[in-house]
Amino acid sequence: MANIIVKIIPEDNLTIFSVEGDLSANEIIKYSTEYYDEKPTKYVLWDATKGSVGKIESSDFNRIAINLKKHTKKRAGGKTALVGKFDIDFGYARMYEAYADLEEIPITYKVFRNADDAIKWLQS
């Protein structure tokens, strides 16, 4: 189970999910669904540099995409940056990008190895 800290920066229209520990698919779905039930920002950063998604089964990323598709219309045209420290996190995040494309989620996803590059991309 991961510790997830959510920080909203309204002036940047940005929400940051900082992950510490091993993140599960159910935690991603839970936090994302709660986020979409509130007032979602245009930009989102999932920062797993102090955590990992490495224990999630690869098939769960498709389940995450299918579940989130129900909510993402609220952020159509938005961007989500996924940051991972380990190769497996980077690879799994790339896999999620592909599932999100297949599900035609109207958000642009991009994977990074550090948060600074991710934030630059989000603000571009």
Image (tube, rainbow, N blue to C red):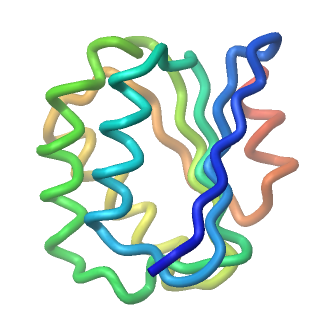
Closest to the observer: 124 or 3? Answer: 3
Residue 43 vertical position relative to residue 49 in the rendered view, above or below = above
Q: Position of residue 114 (x, y in %)?
A: 79, 61
Report the side of 20 relative to 29 (left or right).
right
**Quadrant in the rendering for residue 58:** bottom left
Quadrant of the image occupied by residue 11: top right
36 or 121, which lies in front?
36
> Total marks drawn?
0
- Residue 4, given in percent of the width and then of the height, sits at 59, 61
Compared to residue 5, the image places residue 87 above or below, namely: below
The extreme bottom residue here reads 55
Residue at 36% across, 62% down: 27
Residue at x 79% of width, y 53% of height? 115
Which residue is depicted at the point 77% across and 24% down?
9
Q: Does residue 8 appear left or right of residue 39 in this picture?
A: right
Q: Which image quarter holds the C terminus? A: top right
Q: Which residue is found at the position 87% from the left and 49% from the top?
A: 116
Looking at the rendered image, the quarter that the N terminus falls into is: bottom left
How far from the left and from the top, in percent, is residue 101?
25, 39
Q: Can you say whether 25 is above or below 14 in the image?
A: below
| Residue in the foreground of this view, choosing between 61 and 98 | 61
Q: Is residue 67 left or right of residue 114?
A: left
Q: Position of residue 73 (x, y in %)?
A: 27, 14
